Image (cartoon, coloured by chain):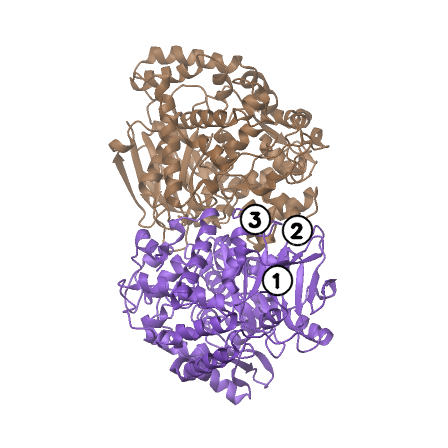
Chain colours: A purple, B brown
């Protein structure tokens, strides 16, 4: 087992701790959520000294298992005021695992106003002054840190948004090329890092041995099948490498579920302009990269390098949700405007979903014209300038709506809804309402059976079976997040009888265990139970597990409404083990 | 019995309704809270079309009973997201009562963006275009409306803050001189009026008969004793007419309970500069008015007319809480700066407590220097300009703290704490925590027995007996608010064996009833139960009935902490009807 590295950001002291029984056998989201539950007072101020910020590699991270390099970060969220886990690719997770660090925990907060950075190497942990980097965007900081520490180090930094402790602030990880393209975006955890005055975390595993498997042969055999499984599924083997998640723009628009003009209709007449097909056309014409991975060992490669009109690198290609938030939601149809907004968010350290939804809500409140991409860009720039307008936008969609007195705010637990209208994809709507994370498609991606025909087929417009679907996906997702696996493996796993068993086989071969698929389900349930317990202690009730009243309105083109009752939705949080 | 006047602000239709059984016998806060509970969906958006804004005179309003002219307004609060009642003096309440209107209810909201105003006369109700007044402050609007409708009409208007639907927006009433000195300040109900696009409500009772008593002789006899009671008590007969509530500055400072520099210590070294004594000195030197009432029939006269250095009227004299919020809390010591801030708040329609506390929180966040009154004035002016900074400040203290990433935010249920530190006046601290209103000293003024020796004497620094004290005061206050009586009558009532009986005698003589003091207690309890029920349905839990963690810190000079547990505090909400 690894160690827990605790850093007191007030005293600048560090301590390595053996993993206590209560955290034994946990990794990724399982570990971050349990530590937050056990160690953070649920009613504390998320930016106060009682909150903690916990980073944890997954259980398979650092092993040769394909797509196992995700890093979880957990805390009490300044956005939702509940528990939060967010994860991303990048280089840090695998390096922490090789360093034998199961969890990195930032505690307390300084009394003064100066920024520090943390450098973690094989033989030492240093806390150094970082004021020379304060005020910089993530692009510049990461470039300087790679110049200083070498181009193989893993980096996590916050931009101007995190420094200002804004509720939509992300923590960005450097991608394998040293660019801040990987975001631990949702829930404002960059603000927690900012409250602790940590500008950057540098992780260098030079000199560390490779991670050894308890049963190397069994691991190798399972991983080979695992790679085959991922490469042979149409979504992970063809769709995602081909167009990235942007493949969804035309698909979800066709399904009448692409929320347009702040969730007024499900079809955007200019969807083709912001589609994956259009994105790839631009990338190819400008000599970008159509498919690249977010971390070493990825065999899916759903990311891209998107260049500007002059052929210079602009941003990592877009998640579908980013295209939607800056596109259909705000009626902006210029892909290069969207690309620049995406880059600015990566640079300043802002969640693209909450920021994009905030722009649409600002349009609702009269601050901008619908579809004015150039004005959106200027507004986002205010975040880095630290203006009052920037603080409003950078605090996310719900805050922006409140600032402007808007009553159409698409958010659950104060977190903005992502890119699937819950009236046309009811399975994901149940997830928005009931996940402890606040509205989050990744917490239980009901789009699978509702739209994609993955893992079965359920009518997206009807309530039937959606609660059960969402619940099962939430459990599976939590377990995948604990393993450190990319969520997209779920497409292949859901369509395969062997998928879960292969994950179990790799866990068993890694640790010398004899887990069964049932144990994985139990792990997923225990994560959700811990998270729900924290939220209960923080004051959440079933009233918080519902969509806002704007979704009671009829939604074209299918003219559906959101009709789940609070009590029906609570079934998605009622777990029976075994 | 009177009628309910319902106005649909979307269709511009009006309807008079007989009072149904469910609302029979209720007035003031009893009626507003019951109507909000019965008619407003608890989870609705407070600025959406489902919310309602209910105005109700008290049960004794319009009668000759001294100090009975308060008007209650109730709604779902945009500030707390819970139920809200706020009340003030002015001219409207007695006029509504004489017009036979027990409740005026604003419903729905317009689709367009134009403002209207409501004119209520004996024989007609008109809804007229009011765009000519949009954008104006309350001083200018009221002057124009008195020019247009006569100097005896009652006026309620919103300023630029309410128009922008900001969470600290008040509804201002004209005082007897036509100035917007009377605020229904707390909870942001001006934003609800703004969401319904009502700029002004004009009430003219010309031609109405006086209200008749069921037993005129009994009423007259009781009211005579009532007037004597108020005039002979040292607080209502001498303290309040002498220095207004500003008498408390030196008193509370002496008690070590004047929260200074955002609740860091209980004594302000410059307290004398912002004291009632200093205020009266200025008023007398500048030919102002030391004592005037907020409504006809007031025998206490705790208000003032405060002139500027040139002898021109500047503002109605200050509530103690206003002096504190703009003074000790922000370390500002210039009374004329405070006077101007008070005037601007009346003019723009802002709650002085939430605005003042927001200024201190903005200082905490580095936006202003501690003690810089001139900068405070400029910041408040931004509200009228509609800038982003103005929107942050105008949304109140909790919102301002969130915008700036501050973790020292003195608020309960998102409403800013008033001018008594809960660690040094624990009785009022229990009220802050447990009243359904959000932090509010007027909801159960434990300062009485804790500091003033009124209604008994309880050590303000100890927990003993404070929960019971607060509960009893909350019950009594609710009943007083239902009667339409000024809360300050409580000083005299608490120290008199006959006080409650006199109120009961007047109610019985007015309506031909045979109530007992127990019935008044039951009425108070039923109001609180209705309000707590609404909040429960809105998603509040006992986690919301607690002070923020900043009050766990030791507070000089008495070095006390806030130590009540959640469960101890719940006793303040557990009622047994006698």
Q: In which quarter of the image is the N terminus of chain B?
A: top left
Residue A3, label in figure: 1
Residue B120 % position (x, y): 35, 36
Query: Residue A554, relative to residue B484: is it above or below?
Result: below
Which is in the foreground here, disc 2 or disc 3? Answer: 3
What is the crowding at mark 2: few (fewer than 14 residues within 10 Å), some, or many (at least 20)?
A: some
Q: Mark 3 points at which residue?
A: A45
Question: Considering the numbered disc 1 on the image, is that residue within a helix, a strand or a loop?
Answer: strand
Q: Where is residue B544 in the image (x, y as percent from the top left)?
A: 47, 42
Residue displayed at 66% across by 66% down: A201
- Residue drawn at x 69%, y 70% as measured from the top left: A122
- The image quadrant where one finds the C terminus of chain B is top left
Is residue A162 visible in the rendered structure shown here?
Answer: yes
Q: Do the residues labelled 1 and 2 touch (CB within 8 Å)?
A: no
> Marks 3 and 1, how far apart in space?
28 Å
Question: Viewer-nearest of labels 1 and 2?
Answer: 1
Secondary structure beneath dot 2 equals loop
The quadrant holding residue A502 is bottom left
Query: Percent from the top left, x then y, of residue A130?
Result: 72, 63
- For the residues marked 1 and 2, what is the alpha-carbon distance in whole angstroms? 42 Å
Residue at x 35% of width, y 27% of height: B98
Q: Nearer the viewer, residue A16 or B488?
A: A16
The label nearer to you, 3 versus 1, is 1
Specify the quadrant of the image occupied by residue B497.
top left
Q: Pinpoint the chain carrying mark 2.
A: B
In this figure, which residue is indicated by the disc labeled 2?
B367
């Amino acid at each position: 087992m690894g160690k827990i590295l605790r850093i007191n950001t007030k005293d600048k002291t560090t301590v390595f701790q053996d993993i206590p029984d209560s955290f034994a056998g946990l990794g990724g989201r399982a570990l971050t959520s349990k530590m937050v539950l056990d160690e953070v007072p649920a009613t504390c101020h998320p930016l106060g000294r009682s909150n903690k910020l916990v980073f944890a590699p997954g259980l398979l991270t650092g092993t040769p298992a394909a797509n196992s390099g995700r890093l979880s970060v957990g805390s009490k969220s300044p956005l939702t005021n509940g528990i939060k886990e967010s994860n991303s690719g990048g280089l840090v997770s695998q390096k922490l695992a090789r360093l034998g660090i199961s969890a990195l925990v930032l505690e307390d907060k300084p009394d003064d106003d100066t920024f520090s950075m943390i450098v973690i190497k094989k033989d030492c942990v240093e806390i150094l002054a970082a004021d020379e980097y304060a005020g910089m965007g993530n692009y510049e900081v990461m470039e300087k840190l790679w110049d200083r520490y070498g181009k193989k180090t893993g980096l996590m930094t916050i931009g101007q948004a995190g420094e200002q402790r804004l509720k939509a602030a992300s923590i960005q990880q450097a991608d394998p090329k040293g660019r801040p393209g990987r975001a631990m975006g949702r829930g404002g955890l960059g603000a927690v890092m900012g409250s602790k005055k940590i500008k950057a975390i540098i992780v260098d595993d030079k000199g560390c041995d490779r991670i050894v498997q308890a049963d190397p042969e069994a691991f190798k055999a399972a991983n080979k099948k695992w790679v085959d499984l991922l490469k042979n599924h149409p979504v992970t083997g063809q769709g995602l490498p081909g167009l990235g998640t942007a493949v969804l723009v035309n698909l979800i628009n066709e399904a009448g579920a692409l929320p347009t003009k702040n969730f007024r209709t499900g079809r955007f007449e200019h969807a083709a302009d912001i589609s994956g097909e259009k994105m790839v056309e631009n990338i190819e014409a400008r000599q970008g990269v159509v498919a690249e991975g977010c971390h070493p060992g990825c065999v899916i490669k759903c990311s891209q390098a998107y260049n500007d009109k002059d052929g210079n690198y602009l941003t990592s290609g877009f998640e579908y949700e980013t295209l939607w938030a800056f596109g259909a939601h705000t009626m902006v149809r210029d892909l290069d405007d969207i690309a620049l907004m995406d880059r600015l968010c990566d640079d300043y350290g802002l969640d693209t979903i909450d920021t994009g939804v905030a722009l649409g809500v600002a349009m609702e409140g009269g601050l901008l014209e619908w579809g004015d991409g150039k004005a959106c860009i200027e507004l986002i720039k205010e975040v880095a300038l630290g203006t009052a307008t920037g603080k409003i936008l950078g605090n996310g969609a719900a805050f922006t709506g409140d600032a402007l007195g808007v009553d159409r705010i698409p958010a659950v637990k104060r977190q903005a809804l992502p890119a699937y209208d819950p009236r046309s994809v009811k399975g994901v709507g149940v997830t928005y309402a009931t996940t402890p994370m606040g509205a989050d498609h990744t917490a239980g991606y009901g789009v699978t059976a509702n739209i994609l025909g993955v893992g079965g087929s359920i009518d997206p417009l009807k309530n039937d079976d959606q609660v059960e679907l969402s619940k099962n996906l939430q459990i599976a997702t939590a377990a995948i997040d604990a393993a450190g696996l990319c969520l997209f493996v779920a497409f292949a796993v859901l369509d395969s009888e062997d998928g879960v068993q292969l994950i179990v086989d790799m866990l068993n071969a890694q640790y010398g265990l004899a887990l069964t698929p049932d144990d994985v389900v139990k792990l997923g349930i225990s994560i959700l139970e811990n998270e729900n317990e924290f939220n209960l202690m923080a004051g959440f009730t079933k009233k918080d597990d519902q969509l806002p009243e704007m979704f009671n309105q009829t939604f074209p083109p299918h003219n559906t409404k959101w009709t789940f009752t609070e009590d029906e939705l609570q079934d998605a949080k009622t777990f029976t083990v075994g």
